[in-house]
Amino acid sequence: MTASRILAITLRQFYLFRGSPARVLPLFAWVAIDIVLWGFITKYLNAVTHTGLNFVPLLLGAVLLWDFLTRVMQGVTTAFFEDVWTRNFLNLFSTPLTLAEYITGLVLTGVLTSAFGLAAMVVLASLAFGLSFLIYGAMLAPFLLILFVWGVALGVAASGIVLRFGPAAEWFIWPIPALLSPFAGVFYPLSTLPAWMRVIARTLPASYVFEGMRAGIAHQSVSAAMLLSGACLAAVYLAAASWIFTSIYRHALRTGLIARYSAESVS
Amino acid sequence: MKGLTKVYGAAAAVDHISFEVGSGEIVGLLGPNGAGKTTTINMILGVLRPSAGSIRIEDVDLSLHRSRALDCTNFAAVYAPLPGNLTVEQNLRIFGMLYGVANLSQRIETLLRQFALLRFRHAKCGVLSSGEQTRVCLAKALLNRPRLLLLDEPTASLDPAVAADIRKMILEFTAESAGGVLWTSHNMYEVQEVCDRVLFLSHGKILLEGNPKTLPREHGKSTLEELFIAVAREPLALEKL
């Protein structure tokens, strides 16, 4: 892999962000709205319930972690969509750029954009609602790592779907986090779910993170085996997403879809 | 290119064609719409996998060493404008990085001057006129001083004065760099002016090959345009000659 080619993909996104408030604002705006909304909900729940539970780390922390995952995924897909919207595939893939360099450039963009979103959420949640990250302890790092890897995997797979089915398939992609969240147990323990939903939940890396988070807050020990399961699953998702994107790219080379992307399908 | 073939289902878009483009040579790839010109160019650009045959660029096999082979090619086509939401300079910088151009800032300055784009350097490509966008695409196509330059109808939709300027710039490029050019065009006057050799494609096969100045007479036609029309309408008659 050549660093300058990876940086070129990321630099393109930097140029776009630099000249466009419409791109910069969503990095902060949606996550800020989520934090404010859930911040007040948790304050209200703390006031009206007398269970002894502190809803701020339980719900607001969960929202923050889930939004981080969403930002990572959308960081990758939005960077990819920029090439969809400008019909840039022919120009890009006729250069020496390799597929691995292209995806790495997209992921690097996702890292940077999600880091901005995370920073905004942390500042707002801490200052406005007193969310302390000390409560999660050292487990915060593996939680974020698992969610990051899974977010990248979802972003790469989603980009592959749009490459295969054309620009209109973009509308499949935006609701993916919302579709997954009921299964991932973001706001409730997996034991709340019916058996068939629990089976699906066990295949999602995020469910291990949120179960671990709740155990940590309840001062129970967070199972290392559980976190390892989540990490391994996230790695499997990433490998599968890379395979999906590579296969779709090869299909596009065979059928000529890269050169005639606006046609959406050539086979 | 050797035995280059692209088959879609039962139909061959390109059917076992072989040709080469020498150093400093401008080869015209001619033929009616749907003859297989753009399919051929897409295969050379590595964005369409051939069903059979091989492509070697500067002795590097494209299928085995894609990045190395594409390092020494570049292209411009009327249907592949650069992203309109980036400025001229930003686009040239990004593509310069993708092609690994040494002393990139200096190279960009040279090309901006050469293609009279200095005053547009901070303009977004999407707001430029067709002629200006074509000049930006050509500047991008020459960033890496390609050994093989692919031009798919580079002067389509340009007025005659701008088209003449573009032809002059490409001729200067081949004279200075000794790079080869594969050029498709439907403007036979242009082809006669710039091409050293032409290949007539019909139904994915090379039907005729030769010097654009002498080829029409060799086939009983007075102009290249007449020959083109004959290829488009009566390819079988020419095949028998």
Image (tube, coloured by chain):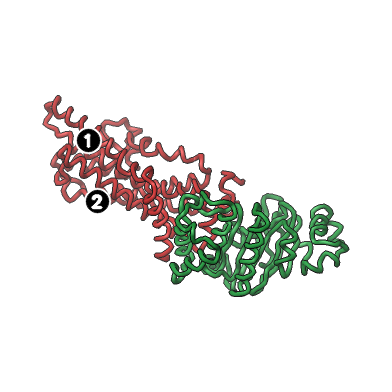
Chain colours: A red, B green
Give the residue type that dot 2 points to. Answer: Pro
State whether residue A188 is above or below residue B200. Answer: above
Q: Secondary structure at mark 1?
A: helix
Q: Horizontal placement of B132 versus A125: left or right?
A: right
**Labels 2 and 1 touching (C-beta < 8 A):** no
Does residue B135 appear anywhere in the picture?
yes
Please name the residue shown 56% across and 69% down the image. Answer: B146
Q: Which residue is mark 1?
A: A59
Residue, far top: A48
**Residue A156, horizontal then vertical, whole percent:** 42, 49
| Mark 2 residue crowding within 10 angstroms, few (<14) / some (14–19) / many (20+) | some
Q: Quadrant of residue A101?
A: bottom left
Residue A248 visible in the shown view: no
- The amino acid type found where label 1 is placed reads Leu
* Image quarter in which the N terminus of chain A is found: bottom left
The image shows residue A234 at horizontal and vertical percentages of: 34, 49
Which residue is at the front of the view, B34 or B189? B189
Q: Is residue A205 left or right of residue B41?
A: left
Q: Label 2 lies in what chain?
A: A
